[in-house]
Image (cartoon, rainbow, N blue to C red):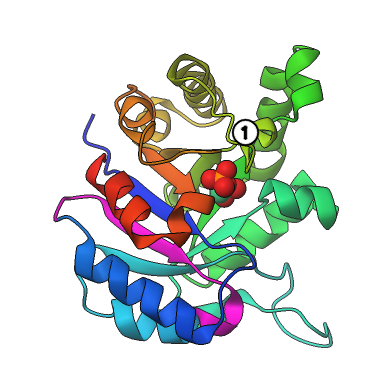
Amino acid sequence: MGRIKIIAGNWKMNKNLSEAVSLTQEIIHSSPENNSLKIIFPPFPFIQSVNEVLKNKKGFFVGAQNCSEHNAGAFTGEVSATMLNSLGCTYVLIGHSERRQYFNETNALCHKKIVQALNNNIKPVYCVGETLQQRKSNTHFEIVKSQITEALSSLNSDQIKQVVIAYEPVWAIGTGETATPQQAQEMHAFIRTCMKDLFDASVSDNCILLYGGSCNASNAKDLFSCEDIDGGLIGGASLKAEDFCKIIASA
Ligand code: 13P
């Protein structure tokens, strides 16, 4: 299909500055050579230092875990996409389930953040996924469809090409319970169908879809070999260089 693979590490709210720098150095040192893109999403205060280490390393990029829906102004504590661009960020996570759960982020808000990112030449990695209750009540497809539709449908054809989607079932995040390759593939294929219905076959075929949720060195290969899975968004296992590099090797 010709889509590139992406292996991304979401460090969440972990590490201090010197730990962030040494982890990045270890990853660079041990990473296997392959054609995948590697993205590190450190906490905001470490973006610049991590980027210093990653700069000019082929295939490595730095991203942010969130951005404001506003351009600039009196929004104490917020970080704009313009600021992230000036730090060298090329990707930003939008709508991670922890942001939806703890900071009440809605699909409509995610849409505004995605537009901010795109206006500042930053590629959004838009996160979707159902809770355990939603899966048990068999509404998971409906939920993911509305997350996609409400946040992405009004993007134009140039904008949508910049968007990466990460399917992260909430019940698999940080729980050690991974979606099976069959469950993940089923949802990724469904997301492609949604993208075809909203846009066209070319957008659907070319859209990069990542899986996230207890993805680790042991299960990555099986997940990444599924037809519609183009890599992973890794939480816990991205905090150890050895594990993260094994996952990179599975791409
Ligand atoms: P875990 O890999 O720790 O389950 O986290 C996944 C995640 O939330 C990545 O964004």
Helix, strand or loop status at disc 1 = helix
Query: Position of 217 compared to 189: left or right?
Result: left
Residue nearer the viewer, 226 or 32: 32
Horizontal and vertical percent for residue 215?
47, 38
Query: Position of 174 compared to 163: left or right?
Result: right
Residue span colored magenta: 33-46
**The residue carrying mark 1 has its beta carbon less than 8 Å from ligand 1:** yes
Horizontal and vertical percent for residue 170?
68, 36
Q: Residue at x 39, y 25 (%)?
A: 201
Residue nearer the viewer, 74 or 215: 215
Give above or below for 217 relative to 94: above
**Residue that badge 1 annotates:** 172
Q: Residue at x 84, y 87 (%)?
A: 74
Quadrant placement of the C terminus: top left
Q: Say if the magenta span includes residue 234.
A: no
Residue sitting farthest toward the left: 33
Give above or below for 244 relative to 16: above
Identity, as a three-letter code, of the amino acid under mark 1: Ala
Q: Say if the magenta span includes residue 37.
A: yes
Other-residue count near label 1 (Cα within 10 Å), few / some / many at <14 / 14–19 / ≥20? some
Camera sees residue 91: yes
